[in-house]
Amino acid sequence: MNLKKFGIILFLIFSLLPINKILAQTTNAGFVPGNIWYSKDPFEEGDKIKIYTLIFNPDSRKFSGTVDFFDNSTLLGTKDFNIAGTSTKDISISWTVTAGDHEIFGQIENAKFLQSNGTYQNASITDNVTSKSSRTVSKKVVTENINNTVNSVDGAFNTAVNSIQNIGDTAKSLVPVSAMQSVNKTTNTIDGWREGTGNILQNSQEETQNKINSLNNTKNLSKNTQNANAIEKPFEYAKLFFFTIFSAILKNKILFYGISVVLALLILRYIWNLFF
């Protein structure tokens, strides 16, 4: 038998084999290359989203199997699919986003075609893994507790200011007018210092209040700037509280001299106990 006859025999043998049996071993059915997308993108820690991919079936037979979705080596979920001939279908699973570095991808398992006689034939898929979708999700900064703390400080501050004003009014009503006039005659120098320092503290109080108002205005600010402002506000409230107390004392003669007398008595008592 010469080579020409041998080649003809081989051709006849292969031409008689079922075409479907040959194609079923390897098929280009599977994922569209690089095909991963999300119901929300970008996403943050705690978001509940869906991860999608798309499978196409160029074959005339029904194509079925399962898709495993992974985050790096962690299995996120599995979804079965059945796709009619020459069609596509999107597959998805739900995912609650966590902080960290992620590489999301899908992988087809148990792929098979439905034969005309009702049996299934396993399929070898050329594109059975999607490209990896890389995402880095930052840890969400919880600002609710900070805001609650700031609101508590704000409420306490207002209560303290009202109390100081009430003390000043009460002290003023208790001291006789004649005593006030006598004190005014003998304390001109002290009064000059008191008023000047009080004005300085009042200006500082107004500047601090304006800064707090600016920190409270969160419109058109980035999330990082808002978080930084929330951390800075308690310190500004503390400064405002200090300036308000001492400016209120210095601006109120009765309160200022009343506290001065009490301090003087305490100092004299300490000196007396020290030497006698």
Image (cartoon, rainbow, N blue to C red):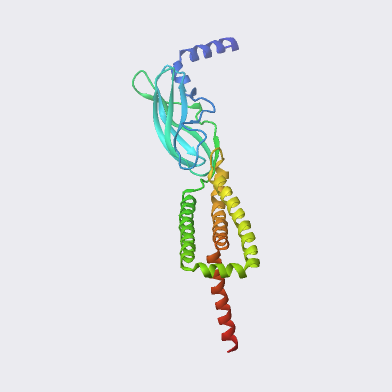
Q: Residue furthest bottom?
A: 276
Is 103 on the left or on the right of 189, as rendered?
A: left
Give the residue drawn at x 38%, y 20%. 115
**Residue 257 place in picture, x, y as percent:** 56, 69
Q: Residue furthest left?
A: 118
Using the rendered view, name the quadrant where residue 195 is placed. bottom right
Using the rendered view, name the quadrant where residue 275 is placed. bottom right
**Residue 118 place in picture, x, y as percent:** 33, 21
In which quadrant of the rendered image does the N terminus lie? Answer: top right
Looking at the image, which is closer to me, 255 or 15? 255
Using the rendered view, name the quadrant where residue 198 is placed. bottom right
**Residue 240 place in picture, x, y as percent:** 56, 56
Looking at the image, which is closer to me, 99 or 22? 99
Q: How many marks?
A: 0
Give the residue drawn at x 58%, y 78%. 267
User: With respect to residue 164, does 226 lie above or below?
Assistant: above
**Residue 95 place in picture, x, y as percent:** 44, 38
In which quadrant of the rendered image does the C terminus lie? Answer: bottom right
Is 220 on the left or on the right of 115, as rendered?
A: right
Looking at the image, which is closer to me, 227 or 260? 260
User: With respect to residue 134, does 186 lie above or below?
Assistant: below
Is 235 on the left or on the right of 57, as rendered?
A: right
Q: Is residue 270 visible?
A: yes
Looking at the image, which is closer to me, 203 or 18? 203
User: With respect to residue 246, does 267 lie above or below?
Assistant: below
Q: Is residue 24 visible?
A: no
